[in-house]
Amino acid sequence: MTAAEISRIAGVTRATVSNWRRRHDDFPAPSAGTESSPLYDLPAVQAWLRGRGHTSTASPTEELRTALRLLGPGSGVAARLFPLAAGASRRTPEELAELAALPDDRLIARAEKTAGELPAAVPEAEPVRYGPDDADAVRALLGCVREAGPQAAVDVLAERELDEGAASGVYQTPEGLAVLMARLLPADASRVLDPACGSGTLLAAAARRGARELFGQDSLPVQGRRTAVRLLLAAPEAETTIRVGDSLRDDAFPDVTVDAVLCNPPFADRDWGHDELAYDPRWAYGLPPRLESELAWVQHALAHLEPGGHAVMLLPPALAFRSSGRRVRAELIRAGALRAVVSLPARAAYPLHIGLQIWVLQRPEPGGTDRTTVLFVDGEGEQRDGAPGTASATDTATATTDAGTRGASRPRRSGSSSSAASSSAASFDWAGLTDRVLGQLAAFTTAPDTYADEPGVARAVPLVDLLDDVVDVTPARHVRATAADIDPVALARRVDDLHKQLAEQVTALAASSASDGWHPSGASAREWRTATVSDLARGGALTVLRAATPGTRGSKGSDAPAVERPVLAARDIAAGNPPSGTAVDIHTDAAQPVIAGDVLVRAVAGGGDAAAMTRVADDRDAGALLGQHIHLLRPDPARLDPWFLAGFLGAEDNIASASTGSTLVHVTPGRLRVPLLPLEEQRRYGEAFRRVHELRAAVRRTADLASDTAATLTTGLTAGVLLPPADPAGPGSRSV
């Protein structure tokens, strides 16, 4: 391990590690590397740190990553640890701690026995054998299962295998999206297939909805193992069958039909087997064009359904309008197989720069009811008072641009451990979107002939209107509000109200940004002694609590654990909002009520993230449950001022020095540093940081109101329901 990794696990700076090397003769000597970049033996360093009372501040997942990396590429230990993660999930934390404390030889023997309990359920798994060199990785895995949960350990193992195999373009389906897709299926769907199962997120969501027979296939062995172990953890009572192979070329379930298919297939894959599969019986709606691999996956899904069965698929927006797929789209519509299309906002799922779509399909039943309409739901639009459901001009332009650029995107598979995609999606309001989409689909399914359109949000379009020369099934094209849908008087009232609110907010912003009282510290910056959060916690000045990540022990049953309190989500800290999370955002075994005065720190942020990283909990947060990806610091008010603590912890340099990653940074709270100042001086700084927080909130509210006002005015003018002012140029202006 490098000196940087030592500093990370010890919660100190690189300079401190260099100091230890110079001052302590018993500090472990380098075991590899070069003079300028020495490498150290992990067990030796850990023993030295323990001897001096330094406990590791690295997260359990980070320690497992380090242990796997130290074994080097090609060791294959990550693949062999999958069944151990599943077996360890059946042990209590006490049993895992006892196992990890055993000497190496006994640890290896017990680990092989534990892993041997489940290998038959994991694709391509053979009897597991561990060597003496694997002992540290085995201990790190057991610690990760004990502290972060078995699913977190499985994700780290998969991440390592994918990195070693250079498997690019593999991204995980966000948990909120998986829940939405699973809930779009009928409640009685018991047999569910995912032919591109990736990490198993969709099948796990189906199991929480009540599915009891789960079938999955993936072309990557690591993803097959990952799915199998995930389902053993999340749905041990379900009958699970996972296979490895190319579903289009080598279908592992050729004779299986199911109640439902959930799938996030590869996009834009030109090597999907177009020539060799030209006469495949699955292409009941036409041979998929070479550049339309997604239409092959759509027909593969329909071929596996029982008559009347449903498929819910995540697909790129260009599939809805590209001319090469027009004939197949038309046949799907004529047959009544396409039931609904839902557009998602950009950044809801990877690829982040476009808004993907969910297609809801149903295999026609012989002699079934003729279907005359298709439902379109625009998840990108915003509902506005006075102009119900009217999407802003910006929304419409963005949707059009994103759809047009999708065709060049590279192939991808669902289901990796990519944190960038999952973090971005975690900040999205999945609960709100899910409620809107399910409400529209339920109304449409119950009475499709009398379904009431909601302009700008959802519309049921007759089949005959779709079967034109383009056969474009892009939701924004069909649901956009027209002038007839907008009440001119109501919109004018809305504009007046927005102008008043904006004027009031500008005044509040000016008050928040007052520069009175800010003075230079002197000719140079102040210098002060600092301590890490770990040091302060050891001294009793504060307590550090960390919420669980998804998939840890105990998460099974319904869609999500039932909670009766609001949930504080990481997105609420970034946006300055009150608790907005739902049961999906929390794990019941790690539920931590928030109290006023707690300091909340986001655990994950994107590179260059300018949003707030910290905040102090107030009365509106009190009693809320702590969501995922948040660190909670509870200071002793007699020793630490909360706003002082939050202000210094959230400083850009402080976050950077206590984080790992570049595109996405994971904050290790124990490494954050705080100046050592008297309480009275802390309170002065704390009051200043509170004013900065209010300024940030005022800027955000002003920007939101200005954007809303501009969008509403643009909509009214272009729809012909608002007239320009009598003197648009105004005094002192010159005409063009």
Image (cartoon, rainbow, N blue to C red):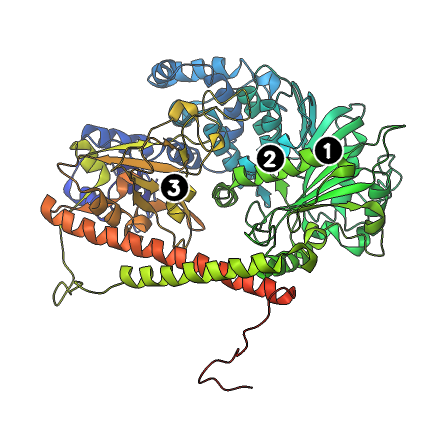
Estimate the spatial distance between the alpha carbons at disc 2 and disc 1, rounded to whole Å.
Answer: 16 Å
Pick whichever, 20 or 30, lies toward us: 20
| Viewport quadrant of the N terminus | top left
Element assignment for label 2: helix
Please determine whether, in this image, residue 472 is positioned above or below residue 534: below
Q: Residues within 10 Å of mark 3 (few under 14, many from 20)?
A: some
Estimate the spatial distance between the alpha carbons at disc 1 and disc 3, rounded to whole Å.
Answer: 35 Å
Residue type, mark 2 in image:
Leu
Q: Which residue is mark 1?
A: 445
Q: Residue 516 appears at what percent x and percent y?
A: 19, 64
Which-is-in-front pick, marks 2 and 3? 3
Left or right of 190, for residue 425: left
Left or right of 482, for residue 470: right
Point 47% across, 24% down: residue = 562
Q: Residue 133 appears at what percent x and percent y?
A: 41, 27
Pick whichever, 624 or 100, lies toward us: 624
Q: Which residue is mark 2?
A: 180
Residue 248 visible in the displayed image: no
Element assignment for label 3: loop
Q: Quadrant of residue 17?
A: top left
Q: Which residue is mark 3?
A: 578
Please determine whether, in this image, residue 88 is positioned above or below residue 30: above
Estimate the spatial distance between the alpha carbons at disc 2 and disc 3, rounded to whole Å.
Answer: 23 Å
